[in-house]
Amino acid sequence: MLARNRFILLLVVGAVLAVLSYSLQYLHFIPINPVPEERSHGKSRKRVNPVIHTEPPEPDPLTDTLRYCNIPNSTEHSTEGHSPPDYKLLSVHVMIRHGDRYPLYSIPKTKRPSVDCTLSAKRRPSHPLLSSFISHMALGGRGHWDASLASLPRLPNHSQCELGELTQTGVVQHLRNGQVLRQAYMTRHKLLSDDWSARQVSVETTGKSRTLQSGLALLYGFMPAFDWSRLTIRQQWSTLFCGSSCDCPARNRYLEQEQHRQYLQRTADTELELTYVTMAKVLGVATRTLRASNPVDALLCHFCHGLPFPCASARGAQTRPQAEGACLTPQQFAVIRRQQCDDERERREAGLYRRYAVLAAHPYLNRSATRMERIARGNQRRKGPEEAVLALASAHDITMAPVLSALGLERAGFPRFAARLVFELWRGPEETGEKGRRGGGGRERKKEGKRGIENTFVRVLYNGEDLTFDTAFCRQHDRYSAQPLCPLGNFLAFVRRDMFSIVNATSYQQACHRAVL
Ligand SMILES: *[C@@H]1O[C@H](CO)[C@@H](O)[C@H](O)[C@H]1NC(C)=O
Ligand SMILES: *[C@@H]1O[C@H](CO)[C@@H](O)[C@H](O)[C@H]1NC(C)=O
Ligand SMILES: *[C@@H]1O[C@H](CO)[C@@H](O)[C@H](O)[C@H]1NC(C)=O
Ligand SMILES: *[C@@H]1O[C@H](CO)[C@@H](O)[C@H](O)[C@H]1NC(C)=O
C-alpha cells in the first residue's frame, strides 16, 4: 500500500514536470542544450544496456523519461574542449544518436499521434539557424553521397510524420549539439580552418533518413553554410558501424543469452503482465497483439510531445471511446517504464550485455583508435594522406549503447534522443630535455619528424560531461600526476587487447570465433 502511494505521488510529480517543461518550451527559447543528465532509459524494442557500479538514487520512471525526451529548453554547461593550458587539440571523434523521431510502431485500434514533421522556424522548438539550414539542404546535390544515401530526403517533410521520421525537435536538438561543439572546437581551438580539406572531415551514417538528417543538422550547427563540394557522406551498412569486421558469431550468442535473461525478467513481472492485459482490454485487441506492437515506443512520442494518450477507436473497442478507461493512461506507461528501469538494473548485474557490447563495439573503437594513433604519430612536415580531424558517426541507440557499455561507462544511461559521445585527442606542451622525458612517460621522442604517442591524450565526453576517468581504461590513472589527462596509450591498449579480458580473450578474432556455452 505504501509503495502504491509513493508511486502515485511520483506520477503526479512526473505529470507536473511534463506540463512545466512543455509550457516552458513554448514560452521562451534559449539556444543550447539541457544540462547533461545521468541516466535515461530506452524502449523494450532494444535489448540493451550499461553497467553501473555505484548506484545513484534511481529517478522515478517519468522524470527519467523526460531526460530521455531531451526537450530543448535550457542552456547547457558542456565541458567539451576543456584542457590544461598549452595543450593542442588534434582531433575529435563524435558519435551521435539521431534526434527525436516519430514512433516506429503504431498501437493497434488507436489513432497515431498527430505530429507535424515539416520544418518551420515559426513552430516551437525553433532555432536561429533553422531557416538557413533548410535552404542549405536544398543545395545538397553538390555533396558526394555514398551508396543509397543520395536518394534519401535531406529534410523531414511530411505534415503528418511517417513512421521513424525525424521531427523538428530532432533537427533542433542536433543544431544545438553542433553549436555547442562549434563553440568548443572551432571558436576556442580552431580545429578546422576556413579552407578545410575534404579529407579532414569524415561523416558516416546508417541508411536511415533520421540518422542522415541528424548528422547534417549537427554538421550545420558546427559549420554553418559548410561547403558541400568538400563533403563526402559515407554509409555504414550495419547499425554497429562494424565496416568489414562484422562477422562475429560469439557476439550473437552473447546477445541471445542477454535476450533470454530479459525475457525471463519480463515474464516474471506480474504488474507489467497485468498492465498489458488491461491495456489490451481497453483497446479490444489480444494481449499478444498489443505486446507485439511495442506500445511504449508510441507512448514515448505522446509523452515527449505533450500529447494526450491514445484512446480506443470506436470500432472494435469493448468500451466506448469517451467512456472512462477507454484511453491508455500515464499510469500504465509508468509501469512499463518502471519495468524497463528494473530490467536495466538487472542487466548491469548479470553482465551478459557487457560481453555482447565488447564485441559489438570493438570495430568502431578500433577504427577510432587507428585514426587517433595515425594523427598522433603524424609527420607534421611531410605531406601524407591526412586523417580526418573531425569524424562524425550518426547512429542509433543500439549503436551507442554497446560503445558506452564496452568503455565501462557506469554512469552513462541508455542513450537519449540526440545523445552525443565525443573522443578528443590532445597533444601536451612541447617536450624539451629533462622535463620532456618526465612528461612523456619515460620514452624519448621517436626519430626526428616522426612523433611517438607518448605526449598525446584522450578525453571522453558524454552529453557534455567529462567521463574520461570513469572509463575502464583510465579509471586507474592518477589525474593529479604529471599527466593530468588520460594517455592515448591506455586507450590503444584497451581497444587492442584489454577490453577482451571480460570474455577471457586477447583479441577480437579469438573472442569472436570461440565457442560460447
Ligand atoms: C528541461 O526539460 C527537462 C526534461 O526534458 C527537465 O528535466 C528540466 O527541468 C527542464 N529545464 C528547464 C530549465 O525547464
Ligand atoms: C516539402 O514538400 C512540399 C510538398 O511535397 C514541397 O512543395 C516542398 O518544396 C518540400 N520542402 C522541402 C524543404 O523539401
Ligand atoms: C583494427 O585496426 C587495425 C589497424 O590498426 C587493423 O589492422 C585490424 O584489422 C582492425 N581489427 C578489427 C577487428 O577491426
Ligand atoms: C572466463 O573464465 C572464468 C574462469 O575460468 C569463468 O568463470 C568465466 O565464466 C569465463 N568468462 C567467459 C565470458 O567465458
Image (cartoon, rainbow, N blue to C red):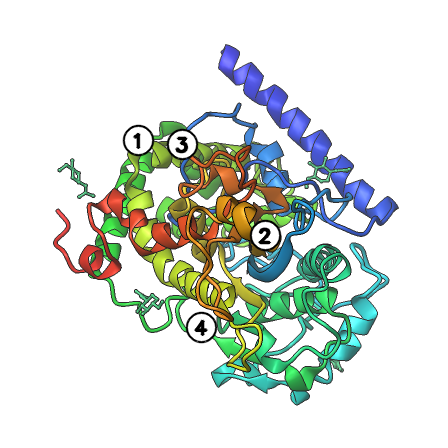
Dot 2 alpha-carbon crowd within 10 angstroms: few under 14, some 14 to 19, many 20 or more: many
Q: Which residue is mark 4?
A: 236
Q: Amino acid at mark 2?
A: Gly
Label 4 neighbourhood size at 10 Å, few (<14), some (14-19), many (20+)?
many
Labels 1, 4: front one: 4
Which residue, given by chain and number where applicable, does mark 1 sit on?
268
On the question of residue 412 being in view, the answer is no
| Label 3 residue SS | helix
Separation of marks 4 and 2 at Cα, in angstroms: 33 Å
Q: Residues within 10 Å of mark 1 (few under 14, many from 20)?
A: few
Q: Earlier in the sequence, mark 2 or mark 1?
A: 1
Q: Quick one: label 2 or label 3, which is nearer the N terminus?
A: 3
Q: Position of residue 301 (x, y in %)?
A: 61, 50
**Residue for badge 3:** 345
Q: What amino acid does circle 4 point to? A: Gln
Q: Secondary structure at mark 2?
A: loop
| Secondary structure of residue under mark 4 | loop
The reply, left or right, for residue 178 in relation to residue 376 is right
Task: Choose between 297 and 516: the one closer to the eye.
Answer: 516
Q: Would residue 183 be visible to someone looking at this image? A: yes
Q: Quadrant of ligand 1?
A: top right
The residue that label 2 is drawn on is 428
Q: Nearer the viewer, mark 2 or mark 1?
A: 2
Which marked residue is nearer to the observer: mark 4 or mark 2?
Answer: 2
| Mark 1 and mark 4: Cα distance apart in space | 38 Å
Q: Amino acid at mark 1?
A: Ala
Which badge, 3 or 4, is on the more N-terminal residue?
4
Mark 2 and mark 3 in contact? Answer it, CB < 8 Å.
no
